[in-house]
Image: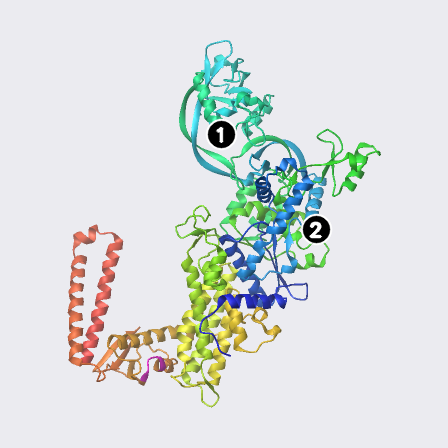
Amino acid sequence: MTIPAQFDAKTIEQKWYNYWMKNNYFHSTPDHRTPYTIVIPPPNVTGVLHMGHMLNNTIQDVLIRRARLKGFNACWVPGTDHASIATEAKVVAKLKAEGINKNDLTREEFLKHAWDWTDKYGGVILEQLKQLGCSCDWNRTKFTMDPDMSASVIRSFVDLYNKGYIYRGYRMVNWDPEAKTTLSDEEVIYEEQQGKLYFLNYKIEGSEDFLTIATTRPETIFGDTAICINPNDERFQHLKGKKTIVPICGRVIPIIEDEYVDIEFGTGCLKVTPAHDMNDRTLGEKHNLEIVDIFNEDATLNSFGLHYQGQDRFVVREAIAKELETLGALAKTESHINKVGTSERTKAVIEPRLSDQWFLKMEELVKPAITAVLETEEIKLYPKKFDNTYRHWLENIRDWNISRQLWWGQQIPAYYYGDGKEDFVVAESIEEALILAKSKTGNQQLTTDNLTQDVDALDTWFSSWLWPMAVFGGIMDPESEDFKYYYPTNDLVTGPDILFFWVARMIIAGYEYTGKKPFTNVYLTGLVRDKHRRKMSKSLGNSPDPLDLIDKFGADGVRVGLLLSASAGNDIMFDEELCNQGKAFSNKIWNAFRLIQGWEVSSAIPQPESSKVAIEWYEAKLQQTLLEIEDHFEKYRISDALMSIYKLVWDDFCSWFLEMIKPAYQQPIDKVTFDKAIEMLESNLKLLHPFMPFLTEEIWQITAQRNTEEALIISEWPKPKAFNANLISDFETTIEVISGIRTIRKEKNIPFKDAIELKVINNDKSTTYFDSVITKLGNISDYTYVNEKVDGTLSFRVKSNEYFIPITGAINVDEEIKKLTEELNYNQGFLKSVQAKLSNEKFVGGAPEKVLEMERKKEADALAKIATIQQSLAGLK
């Protein structure tokens, strides 16, 4: 067949992905082989591919394809997450654009819109992953809202409730006023913001005196229910037992005493707003204070805000400050930087809010997860530096707020049969709930019509923490064949930003439900940033469209470009030039393949000694690289593994091996060498396949007629064999000799077609094994070992060996002597100036050590250069 001059990535990618899919190579079912399992970190169902996904999924595909080649039963489970907050926000926005208010819909009506949205946009990202070459078992695709997945979540909730781990409590929670739901502590991001500190005067009841309080939030004065002083503060002893008047609203509140107040901080007085601050809530409970909630769920002020009712908290802040100033209650303002909690999803500023919510006790559940990672190392994090982050979070964990004021998600399986807060039962279905409610109340007349299910949904992470178990049916049927075969999984590849949200929680759930780890290794990738170290974002315009990159550089080129810079746990400085480098590597491999295929093959000619030596050397080099690759993969240094293969193919195979075996112009190659060249090429393709699946499968299928059982994707990873390491180190010397010959040819304008002689004094006792290679690559007509220097030659050294090239008629000896003499004079003058500096005590005493090192190196280099020139002159005279 005619091999195209250019590698056509677009055509080839589609062709081979369809071929792999048609022949079901990605699908896995339990059998006699050892399983190798990865579950995908499920992206948002309505998400699209971004650079982080590209990196994360390329690494997973590399691991799964390599495992497949190594004979494992490789299973990569794909899927998507329903992403409660993000998806519901998108649906609400879509409805709003259509003039529909969510609050005017029933839950069922809203969920129909949400499912329509999901059906339309869900799974787009999975289709995009196919363009990247991801070899997921698409038959196993899961969605966290699939019926069986939701059933697993509900069963988990009921089980944990019955064990006493889940409870309902009236607590201060993180409230997202944009999404109108609570968030767990881990979903709040604290950011430093420039704001103001307002100093407010509170009048003492029955006098003209006042107290000054400092606050960053003057709008919360409407919720003040006390002023707190430290009982040991001498400044305020006269205020004990008195009351103050809150400005604007005129509420009379007590002055209370508590050592919680820091005498040294601020004014030494603290306004207490129990409904809107975690610490104030604790003080309020201790001193039995009134709780006044001043905000609506969207963070506008309610009726307690008086004439500011209905206005946004940030809008009213300046207006309230102005009114306070008018009343003489604003003493002063100062600039102030403080940490403000924002929603990870909506970016809205979080509002502390008292609310009835569902919580999961974590103190006991977390213990096996701490042991597994930090003590027994049954689970390993790569890189290990994340152990400390993991430890800090788990050892300081608080109860998990698992309820969300959303409709999109698994509805909490709690059913109320009365008006009281405790008048509920928890069950997997309303029918089971009815049985429990009848038993609990003793009322056998109850019907399902008397039961009302809790309106809240569960936190998305409460669904995805079951992912490695639920995708194999392990929650609903722990004895299922799939679950017993594939669980625990092997490797998890994800970002460090969800080490708490997801990774740690999966470990907790795994031990709680199976007593086993959910996975063995966690490879934490870095964040993809631009070349200026900025985080990629649409607003900065520095985040390229991954599909555009694939279109421009080919999927293989993009995969290589990403991985060449992706060391574990470190941020990746992405530059399109990396993808261009990947594309250039694809072209290099393609051209090398075309070169081999273009040779005429003859069975009639003997194998040259140089080809025999080249093959033995390259086989040793391949085996050495194979050991390096295994070591890199064991340590999850995927980038280093690729770099080892890259150097093997580009430098050793293309630059040296093919040159060593290449037949003379328009001459055939012997069949023994050709067959070995194809064998070496195919070994390279196997090593490259996990990284560059499309290019390698294309070349593999052209090198020989293959049936479906012989495709590269299911071939066999090269087996390690014993090899002669001396061949590799000896060849390094050979490279230096060939470089020395080529340098002289270049400097003296001796064309390669002109054969030259080479004489060698073998002081170093170097092996003669590669002499045939030197002879071929140097175009040497006569390679002779001598015992003394040869006159009338150009020379160079490699280690202690001396190499002499006799002067041919093409060189004018007199001109060469003149040129070398000028070069010698220049270098001797340069050496003199350097040595003058180094003999100057003032310079040596005052110069930095680095400068001195540089000068000494200049001296050494000049001395070596002078010796070489003098040797060359001696040979010419």
Q: Which mark is residue 139?
A: none
The three-letter amino acid code for the residue at tag 1 is: Phe
Residue pointed to by mark 2: 148
Q: Between tags 1 and 2, which lies in front?
A: 1
Answer whether labels 1 and 2 touch (C-beta < 8 Å): no
Q: Circle 1 sits in a helix, a strand or a loop, which is it?
A: helix
The three-letter amino acid code for the residue at tag 2 is: Asp
Q: Quadrant of residue 293?
A: top right
Q: Is residue 764 above or below residue 109?
A: below
Find the residue positioned furthest to the right.
444
**Left or right, residue 106 beside residue 700:** right
Rendered location of residue 842, percent (x, y)? 17, 52
Rendered location of residue 830, percent (x, y)? 17, 64
Find the magenta span and give its range: 776-780
Q: Is residue 610 above or below residue 798?
A: below
C-alpha span from label 1 to label 2: 44 Å
Find the residue positioned furthest to the top.
206
Q: Quadrant of residue 14?
A: bottom right
Rendered location of residue 635, percent (x, y)? 51, 59
How many numbered circles does the render carry? 2
**Residue nearest the viewer, comparing 26 with 287:** 26
Residue 383 visible in this rendered orientation of the protein: no
**Left or right, residue 227 beside residue 408:** left
Of callouts 1 and 2, which one flags the residue occurring earlier in the amino acid sequence? Answer: 2
**Left or right, residue 414 beside residue 551:** right
| Image point (20%, 50%), residue name | 846
| Label 1 packing within 10 angstroms: few (<14), some (14-19), many (20+) | few
| Label 2 packing within 10 angstroms: few (<14), some (14-19), many (20+) | some
Residue pointed to by mark 1: 314
Rendered location of residue 348, percent (x, y)? 52, 37
Q: Circle 2 sits in a helix, a strand or a loop, which is it?
A: helix
